[in-house]
Image (spheres, rainbow, N blue to C red):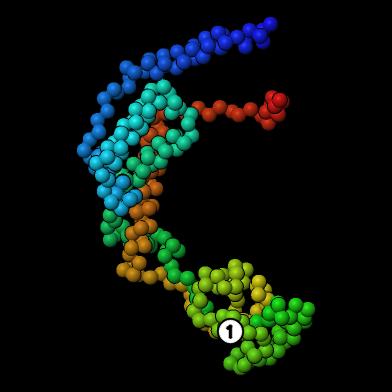
């Protein structure tokens, strides 16, 4: 009997009407707090036209500009009414956008241009961020994993023995297989080595001794024996040579600092209450 009553059209109509009435009442109760005047300033119209021009590489026509203004008004009406109805509450996307805008405001409060003393101090306090990379010059003897699939391990042992007796200036590279990028690499950085041989190869070679054959070092190509002839440690360039990079780093650090200061000052206005979450056992028990 109860289910039959729920299927009655009149009852369904009354329930729907009550829900709509409640929504209109909620919106209407906030109208007194919602500004009813929407002003589209000339600056706003110019901003809409600029956005159109950047997208389409031409200024908007009369009808197009009117459409942009109409669309902005539509956005504003729905935005205001949505806020008045409380629809912005507990919306993750809206919360994040508002947070981002607040953070941008905090970043804009940072100093626009650093002084010479500030740049020098930032460089001195963060030398590792501006130091040039170490560089190596080395030769290699290569054993191809493709050509020597069945014998690469035994061939590697024989080559190690031969290289132990070889002169650094001798024709040691003739003992190996051809390598597509050659046998000699001059003043290469860790990033250069990673891009050619891989990360594991680069980590090993940059801690090896200079002046003798060492290996094998494995890569995706096969096995490599290397002879490091020169090692150039990274250096800290003078400020004049890296001024723009230091300025960018300094400005970014100031923006982050200003944003944190803004957050700290705003947080002090609130009483923060963090409730204890339920225990795992309680969560498990409440699952259906």
Looking at the rendering, in which quadrant would you find the C terminus?
Answer: top right
Quadrant housing residue 197 = bottom right
Task: Give the total number of marks visible in the rendering.
Answer: 1
- Residue at 50% x, 27% y: name it: 273
Q: Nearer the viewer, residue 188 or 213?
A: 188
Residue 36 percent location from the top left of the image: 29, 22
In this picture, is 71 found above or below 172? above
Local crowd at mark 1 within 10 Å, few (<14), some, or many (≥20)?
some
- Residue at 70% x, 27% y: name it: 287
Residue 224 percent location from the top left of the image: 65, 79
Looking at the rendering, in which quadrant would you find the N terminus?
Answer: top right
- Asked if residue 61 can be seen in this view, the reply is yes
Q: Residue furthest left?
A: 42
Residue 90 percent location from the top left of the image: 48, 29
Quadrant housing residue 123 = bottom left
Q: Is residue 195 left or right of residue 56?
A: right
In this picture, is 43 found above or below 160? above
Q: Residue furthest top?
A: 1
For mark 1, what is the residue? 183
- Residue at 56% x, 8% y: name it: 11
In this picture, is 10 found above or below 269? above
Residue 100 percent location from the top left of the image: 41, 41
Q: Is disc 1 placed on a helix, strand or loop? A: loop
- Residue at 26% x, 25% y: name it: 37
- Asked if residue 138 can be seen in this view, the reply is no
């Amino acid at each position: 009997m109860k289910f039959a009553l729920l299927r009655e059209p009149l009852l369904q109509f009354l329930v729907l009407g009550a829900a709509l009435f409640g929504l209109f009442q909620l919106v209407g109760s906030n109208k007194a707090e919602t500004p009813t005047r929407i002003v589209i300033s000339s600056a706003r119209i110019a901003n809409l036209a600029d956005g159109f021009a950047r997208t389409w590489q031409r200024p908007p026509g009369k009808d197009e500009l009117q459409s942009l203004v109409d669309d902005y008004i539509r956005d504003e009406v729905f935005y205001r009414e949505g806020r008045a109805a409380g629809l912005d509450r507990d919306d993750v996307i809206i919360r994040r956008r508002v947070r981002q805008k607040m953070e941008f405001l905090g970043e804009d409060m940072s100093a626009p241009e650093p002084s010479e003393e500030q740049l020098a101090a930032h460089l001195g306090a963060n030398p590792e961020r501006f130091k040039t990379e170490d560089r190596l010059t080395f030769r290699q003897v290569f054993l191809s994993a493709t050509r020597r699939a069945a014998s690469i391990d035994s061939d590697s042992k024989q080559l190690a023995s031969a290289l132990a007796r070889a002169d650094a200036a001798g024709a040691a590279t003739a003992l190996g297989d051809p390598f597509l990028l050659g046998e000699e690499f001059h003043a290469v950085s860790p990033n250069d080595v990673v891009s050619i041989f891989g990360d594991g190869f680069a980590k090993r070679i940059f801690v090896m001794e200079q002046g003798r054959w060492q290996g094998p070092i494995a890569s995706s190509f096969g096995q490599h024996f290397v002879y490091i002839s020169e090692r150039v440690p990274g250096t800290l360039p003078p400020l004049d040579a890296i001024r723009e990079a230091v300025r960018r780093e300094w400005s970014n650090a100031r923006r982050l600092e200003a944003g944190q200061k803004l957050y700290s000052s705003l947080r002090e206005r609130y009483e923060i209450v963090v409730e204890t979450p339920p225990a795992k056992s309680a969560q498990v028990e409440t699952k259906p």
